[in-house]
Image (spheres, helix red, strand yellow):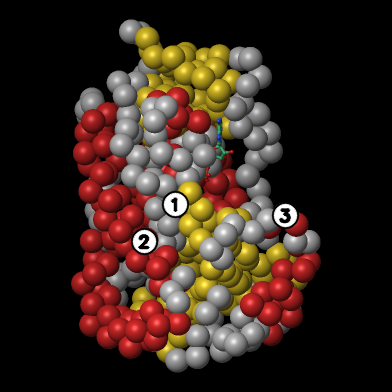
Amino acid sequence: MRITVIGGGVAGAATALALRRTGAEVTVHEAYQDPAGAVGSFISLAANGLRGLAALGCLPEVQRRGFAVAEQRMWSATGRLLGAMPRGRLAGDTLRSVTLMRGQLVEALRTEAERAGATLRTGQRLTGLTEHADGVRAEFADGSTTEADLLVGADGLWSATRTLLDPAAPGPAYAGLYSVSGRAEGVPGDPSVFNLTFGRSGAFVHLPAPDGSTWWSAQVAAPEPPDLAAVPQADWPDRLAGLYRHEQLPLALLRATTEVHRPTLMHTLPAVPTWHSRRVVLVGDAAHPVGAGQGASMALEDAVVLAQVLQRGGPLAEYDRLRRDRIGRMLKAAAANRDAKTAGPLARRVNDVVLPLFFRHFHDRSTAWLYTHELGVLA
Ligand SMILES: Cc1cc2nc3c(=O)[nH]c(=O)nc-3n(C[C@H](O)[C@H](O)[C@H](O)COP(=O)(O)OP(=O)(O)OC[C@H]3O[C@@H](n4cnc5c(N)ncnc54)[C@H](O)[C@@H]3O)c2cc1C
């Protein structure tokens, strides 16, 4: 089977690898010329995403490029510990969450996909597609075209495949948050702990890395989307220190920042009704940007499940059926997570009382469905 994959990000590279494992002939078409490299912000992979990598046969390659994080501590704006729990896994799970630069994850997956025999073409932006009786034809902005038996749209939040598949498909909407992240040097902290503070201006994350640096990220609540490009990169630490001045946070981190990553607006996407036709299917953010630190993990799951379905000769409707409920549940959890980050003063006070009880008594019970999901293997 010849398969065209549109987009060489997490979902596209993982899908290419998964499909190669099943013997398909795979070509990835990525809009940008440059390889992913060590650019962008950092992301964390939870136990379910790590199991996806294990099914793809490349868990060690990804673990090597990041660092393991054992524990998560949640803090109120006033500096009260709301809860401590294993990070991205259940208490008994020995598979520790991995944090790494998104670009490093993409690079690892692309390398493994190419090593497995997939072809990667960069500088090719999808602009059109036509399904016909014998296959699907993709058209690119550079005027080139390609034919395949199946086209996988892994082209992210602003997916062209999604709208070509269904012109009435919903588009992204600003989520009321923007994200800025960076790295600081020389500020001591507990190693292997991911700290999340529910601040008045939004959530603030910091986690010490094994090399002595501390990775931080602010998800700032802002009802209207700000013009992020208008703020010089070097001004962000001071700006954030001002925004979070009332919080009990290690603001020394911002003063000790040596690297700021490009800020980004956060978006949500209403449920996408059409994930597939006969020869076209969506994976990753193109189908469902889930948020709550699960987007990459869910993209990895998609890749494995799609390959398994195709391997047993199943129709694309089976992939849709196998993924819908889980993604729907994840979207609900992500909405609650976003609400906690953008909560006003009253809701924050309620959260300060309710969250410790929730974390103590219900964390494992309420997240078991997410972290212990079994994907099975790829032959
Ligand atoms: C600030 C922030 C923090 C995050 N933190 C986490 C986290 O901690 N854990 C987690 O699991 N997830 C996290 N996520 C989400 C995660 O990054 C995404 O869910 C994941 O990258 C989705 O992968 P994707 O391949 O579907 O999309 P993308 O990574 O966006 O990749 C899409 C690819 O398609 C290419 N493309 C786009 N249009 C075209 C076209 N027309 N033709 C060809 N190619 C095209 C793009 O260039 C890109 O390479 C975070 C997201 C953000 C914004």
Q: Residues within 10 Å of mark 3 (few under 14, many from 20)?
A: few
Q: Is mark 1 within 8 Å of ligand 1?
A: no
- Label 1, label 3: how far apart the Cα atoms are: 20 Å
Q: Is 48 in front, or is 63? A: 48
Q: Position of residue 232 (x, y in %)?
A: 78, 61
Q: Where is mark 1, residue-wise?
A: 268
Taking the image as shown, residue 219 lies to the left or right of residue 150, namely right
**Residue 211, numbered label:** none
Q: Which three-letter amino acid code belongs to the residue tagged 2?
A: Ala
Q: Which three-letter amino acid code belongs to the residue tagged 1?
A: Thr
Q: Residues within 10 Å of mark 2 (few under 14, many from 20)?
A: some
At 31% from the left edge and 37% from the top edge, which residue is drawn?
273
At 60% from the left edge and 51% from the top edge, which residue is drawn?
103
- Label 2, label 1: how far apart the Cα atoms are: 9 Å
**Residue 229, numbered label:** 3
Q: Position of residue 369 (x, y in %)?
A: 23, 61
At 61% from the left edge and 26% from the top edge, which residue is drawn?
124
